[in-house]
Image (cartoon, rainbow, N blue to C red):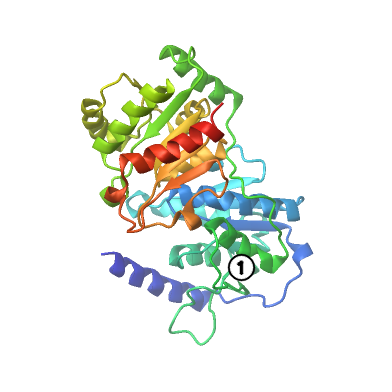
Amino acid sequence: MKSVEKKLRILFLKLILFFIKNKSTSFEAKSFDRILIIRQHDQLGDFLISTPTIRAVRKKFPKSYISVVVSQYLEPMILNNPNVDEIIVYREKLSRWNFKWFINFIKNLRRDGGYDLAIVLNTISRSITSDLIALLSNAKNILSSDNHLLTGFKTEPVYTILSHRDEKEKTEIQRNLDIVKAIDVKSNGFDYDLFLTNEEILEGKNILKKLNLHRYKKIVGVHFGTLDVTRRFPLDKLAEVIDLIISKYNVTVLNIIGKNEIALQDEFLKLVKHKIYLAPLVPIRISASIMQNLSLFLCNDTGPLHIASALNIPTVSFHSTNDPKIWKPPHSRHIAVRTKDKLINSITVRDAMNQIHKAMTNYVN
């Protein structure tokens, strides 16, 4: 099914290219008054990883009008971001498209004369959807990486400015930043951006009060999410870890889940011997406001790891196939647990406890 969808997207891309041709092969970095950044992929972690690039573009072009295209799922992660003037929401599910929405989407992409530059943040693979959005925006220049150039074309059909992808091992943050080096944008740090409002922060504190957690100084959050079992640290081992840290470090544990993890939570509660607290199911930004009060966060290699990083919360995360050197937040306060065989089931309770001890000693006050 996915291969059929990809073929249809490429066919649509060729159709769009028939009507819209590349407009520019030369540019001046100082002349980009309106900039469109396209990152509509629906992976939460991938999007937060790109926020240092958005911030760096803003620093280089402080007076430019900057818009960002994001999926509906990711819109909460970019709200209130001072580096963005406009958020353009892309409906990732075709079932939610209709003719009126599509026309309004195109109008938003082309409002006020369109954009001088569209930046397509393709790192791991090339997104045909991102290419289509860039073309439909009618931007004068389109920038992306020379990674995964399309076959079947004599020359690059979409991007007018290509950044070179080298073969050095780099974090995904650096890969995103490398794309905008072609327009003389320099890094402004590797921290993620997530801006909560005062009202949201207060709501998070009030939820902790309702749970009677405001009395405790050290609260360890735990999130066992991801429906992919190959990336989920086994619940029985995690339960044993939780019992050990409660006994050894005298901490309070708060379990934070998403709407798809209710059944997993029921299973987990049967395995844990000590009392733990349960955060209510709330919107993702309120969940973040709860997390902001944590001393440490335990999780798998999923989006909440990156939310914790954006909130400067120390983490211990469990990894399998995705190399933490590339995907983990790069700061020392984030500690990855991974075995040589890259299998999540191979991580032992002792492996986890060794890294948790390091985090408790060095990063938890």
For mark 1, does the 10 Å Cα neighbourhood hold few (<14), some (14 to 19), or many (20 or more) residues?
many
What's the amino acid at mark 1?
Leu
Which x, y percent locates residue 172?
Answer: 53, 58
x, y (%) of residue 277? Answer: 36, 20
Residue 75 appears in view: no
Count of residue discs? 1
Against 191, residue 308 (above or below) is: above
| Residue labelled with disc 1 | 143
Q: Is residue 15 left or right of residue 80?
A: left
Examine the rendering and report whether any part of residue 48 can be seen. Answer: yes
Quarter occupied by the C terminus? top right
Considering every residue shown, the one lying at the far bottom of the view is 154
- The residue drawn where x is 32% and y is 39% is 349
Q: Is residue 211 above or below residue 232?
A: above
Q: Secondary structure at mark 1?
A: strand
Residue 53: x %, y % from top left? 62, 54
Task: Describe residue 158's horizontal placement relative to residue 189 as left or right.
Answer: left
- Residue at position x 42%, y 31% from top? 283
Quadrant of image for the N terminus: bottom left
Residue 32: name its quadrant.
bottom right
Residue 29 position in % (x across, y down):
75, 66
